[in-house]
Amino acid sequence: MKEENTINSEKLPQHLAIIMDGNGRWAKQKGFLRTIGHENGATAVKRTVEQCARLGIPFLTLYAFSTENWNRPKFEVDMLMKLLVKALKKEVKTLQENNIKLNAIGNLDLLPATVRKELTEVLEKTKNNTRLTLSLALSYGSRNELIEATKEICNKVKNNIISVDAIDESVINKHLYTHNLPDVDLLIRTSGEQRISNFLLWQIAYAELYFCDVLWPDFSNEHLLEALKVYQNRERRYGKTSEQINK
Ligand code: FPP
């Protein structure tokens, strides 16, 4: 794709995370049921995953279902779970052909058995793929992730497996669902909302944040390229001065 040549492949985010927001509003604007918004959101997922693989972004994490989303009407939750099963069944072949490894983060025990079964199969089938790791955040909440990590670490201290003094960033990292992923470099949220909504709180400590007004089902390859261009023009200082970074 011609437009993709305008991106500096040396300066791509290693880990891109996306809060895919606006499916419901997209549907409402068109007079459709919210569920149609989610179906079109799934098409945008496919488009975005394929583009990230093409561009050479090695880690993509998508906020597909939060712990708070369990509070939505049962009809919508059921539909989202069915959509997930359908997408997993349908896309496993594309994942294999494109050398994409599927990963899942979140409290997966809360997912219905049908989803867990399909997910386990696709995770197993794609586990040796190396081009892109696609992590789906499912029944995910960052505070919950941190609570679980804290409990595990406390148990290890109690059982003399680690000492309190040995607890550092790498120990915390190892106990998160994202233990096998690098920190997030770029976080995108669609639909005009400018909040983090309990997503990857620890992992976005130094991420660049990018908010755009487009509703998730309309998020196109051009929108991603625009976000990447903005990212590539940001100066990431990690607390240092501009002069230190540019010397
Ligand atoms: C947010 O829009 C979207 C969700 C809560 C679900 C995300 C699901 C998909 C993109 C489709 C399926 C995903 C996969 C991985 C196949 P919203 O419903 O909060 O929209 P609103 O804020 O406009 O109501």
Image (cartoon, rainbow, N blue to C red):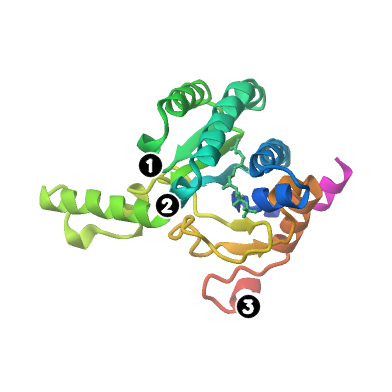
Amino acid type, residue under disc 3 in the picture? Ser
Does residue 36 appear left or right of residue 170 in this picture? right
Q: Secondary structure at mark 1?
A: loop
Tell me which numbered mark, 1 or 3, is placed earlier along the sequence: 1
In terms of depth relative to the viewer, which is nearer, 144 or 222? Answer: 144
Question: Disc 2 marks which residue?
Answer: 141
Secondary structure, mark 2, is loop
Q: Nearer the viewer, residue 99 or 64?
A: 64
Q: Relative to 18, is 244 above or below? A: below
User: In the rendered image, which residue does mark 3 sit on?
Assistant: 242
Q: Nearer the viewer, mark 1 or mark 3?
A: 1
Disc number for residue 107? 1
- Is residue 214 on the magenta stretch? no
**Image: 164 above or below 26:** below
User: Dot 2, crowdedness within 10 Å: few (<14), some or many (≥20)?
Assistant: many
Residue drawn 78% across the image and 46% down it: 221
What's the residue type where badge 1 is placed?
Answer: Asn
Cα gap from disc 2 to disc 3, whole angstroms: 34 Å
Which residues are drawn in magenta?
Answer: 1-9
Give the residue displayed 15% in from the left and 47% down from the top: 161
* Residue 95 horizontal/vertical position (percent): 62, 26
Find residue 110 and report its horizontal and vertical position in percent.
37, 37
Labels 1 and 2 touching (C-beta < 8 A): yes
Q: Amino acid at mark 2?
A: Gly
- Quarter holding the C terminus? bottom right
Q: Is residue 87 visible?
A: yes
| Element under disc 3 | helix
Which residue occupies 65% across, 44% down?
34
Label pair 2/3, CB-CB below 8 angstroms: no
